Image: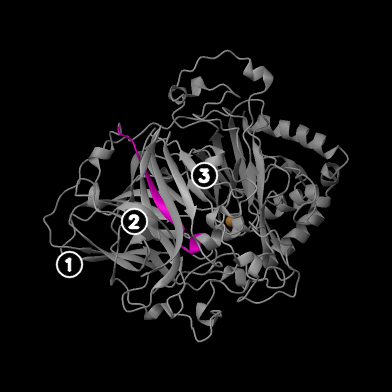
Amino acid sequence: MTRRARKITWVVNAAIVVGLSLPLMKIARGSAATDGTRAAAKTAQVTHHDRRHMHMRNWALEPTGKPGVSPLDPNRIPKYVNELTKPPVFVPDGFSGRGPHYTVTYKAIQQQLLPRGFPTTEVYAYGGLTNSAELGQRPQIATTFSTPGPTFEAVRDQHIRVHFVNQIDGGHIFPVDPTIMFANPNNQPAPQPPFKPFPPGYAFAQNPVPVVTHLHGGVTPSDSDGFVDAWFTKGEAKKGPAFTSSTFEYFNAQLPTTLWYHDHTLGMTRLTVAAGLAGAYLLRDRNDRIAPLLPSGPFEIPLLIQDRAFNDDGSIHFTQEGDNPDVHPYWDPEYFGDTIMVNGKVWPRLRVARRQYRFRIINASNARFYNLKFSNGMSFTQIGGDGSYLPAPVTLTEALMAPAERIDILVDFSKQQPGTNIILQNTANQPFPSGDPVDPATTGQVMRFDVQATPAVPPRTLPAKLIDIPTLVETEGIGNPKLFTLNEHESDADEPLEVLIDGQRFHSPITELPRVGTTEAWYFQNLTEDAHPVHIHLVEFQLEDRQEIDVDRFKAYWESLNGSTLPLNHPTIRANVEDAIDFPPTGTARDFLTGPSEPPSPAESGWKDTFVAPPGKVTRVRIRFAPQYTKESDLVPGFNPFPFDATAGPGYVWHCHILDHEDNDMMRPMKMLAPTPAMASVERQPVDKAHAHR
Ligand SMILES: [Cu+2]
């Protein structure tokens, strides 16, 4: 459908929803001007940067919650003495009908994150049977636990089953805030103010620790997807309402790429991930024609980047008091640490040979964006993103990564002189984009590459084209585009109370019920001041474009339809920035677009599962509810093209991947719909690969 056609459809829909009596007429008469002025005044107030939220905490001034323990000054931590380690690889402990079986256990352990000489740190770790030797070397099999967790090595189309075992004893190491939505394993009512400080916090919220793992980017049946309410405590003594099994099945029926796994428990993800529950999941394809041209073995390394603050006893310094302690005693809108850790080591170095390396970089931070570049300005080649290779290799000198995004890059050290030290730097503001600048001495540095005196090995040449990315075609007659706003609910002091999608909370009635086999257009109209990395489960999809909007005017319009009280107490009346609405200053109707359409950058042109929705813009994506490899011509709306029943189980979620936002309602449910009876009667032969699985 063209943009113009959409416009007309929308006005008709809106008229029906609004019942013809609501503000559309009022707007035509110009009352939007009044609303607009008010909204502009409010926005001006909020945009000014004195707001605590727009600043990184000064950890030196924050309570540690432990008597005699002080915050650790990041400038006291020597850089590049920690050696980067490569996480070991999980090995199966058996085979079941369709493939390998793994047992993965969660446990609290002590790990050396800070350089030697500093104390160890208590973290939550994933562990199990692992191999720490490179492929082709004599295996070194042992039971190991670590953060990041061991790496999964999966093969396309080979199912794996993973049994997760929760062995976390005692209470959570970070403050669990019972005033936001959360797993609540003891099923207690939310406390009322005045709130208790942490420690001790609320015992019923701290203990036991529920967990559930999500394979990020995985095309997975919903009962194996780590639905937020499918959590379980130690020994499965307590289980969430959506729990069905602690054994998950991953189909790996998707293109080879860098996935990652992490905890996803309702309202606690920011805490469990910050405590250590994340790891890499590399999906390979035996028929991949690009992989043989790429560095492998010791020259292919996943890099999980995370920021943390520490105390002088080695413990992680997590927020003890929220920005709005009268409403949420411990929740903070964003956790920004003052040190940068890669693969569980603070400011590590990697000794590199003079040759090309392949780095699978995962931004596994709670809220921090990274704009990565090398201190010597050298370029690198990005070959992959979240869900696949890029259509073509891209030469870059910097790469922006939002939380949960991945980049697959090739870095050539062959032309560097032995003894050269190159720092991987970060220049992204915190919060991104308009928060505080990073400190070049601390958060502006990530890791260092020390070039060794080895013979120079030139890299292999890559083909100009890596993969074909099909053009997705929006399905007609299903109400495209789906319109969303991203809203921040603020206190009188302009501090965020919660972050919402469409003005709705997670537990508001479900509105996203796509039918399998259809392609939807989703618009994200960001009315907040922060960039939000939006992640949608089940699918890898495509970014269409972004476009600047008049936020103040659109917000006034949206509020004229929905009211300005958040969260909304009624279904959202959706509005489109493309709609032409009366614009009193000129006396003509005008849409809310104020800039040209910005196509995705070459680095964003592959399959994505997480994309940045920048402030003041509409971000448009096309989502096909089908596997990546399905041919467009084989799709029949309502016919399930997945190798599993995507309509079964508890369903899926989509959310902002700033974990602190996701935990406080910036998440919505999504459930796939089965075919309608009419659709089910369509005669159809299974033709594609998906159905060959059965
Ligand atoms: Cu967000």
- Judge the density around disc 3: few (<14), some (14-19), many (≥20) Cα neighbours within 10 Å: few
Residue type at tag 3: Glu
The x and y percentages for residue 88 are 31, 54
Query: Viewer-nearest of labels 1 and 3?
Result: 1
Disc 1 from disc 3: Cα separation: 42 Å
The x and y percentages for residue 105 are 44, 54
**Placement of 624 over or under 460, stated as above or below:** above
- Judge the density around disc 2: few (<14), some (14-19), many (≥20) Cα neighbours within 10 Å: few
| Residue extending furthest toward the top | 683
Q: Earlier in the sequence, mark 1 or mark 3?
A: 1
The reply to whether the residue tagged 3 has its Cβ within 8 angstroms of ligand 1 is no
Locate ligand 1 by image quadrant: bottom right
Image: magenta residue range: 273-286
Q: Which residue is mark 2?
A: 143
Disc 1 from disc 2: Cα separation: 37 Å
Q: Which residue is mark 3?
A: 598
Q: Secondary structure at mark 3?
A: loop
Q: Earlier in the sequence, mark 3 or mark 2?
A: 2
**Placement of 212 over or under 306, stated as above or below:** above
In the displayed structure image, the side of residue 663 where residue 146 appears, left or right = left
Query: Viewer-nearest of labels 1 and 2?
Result: 2
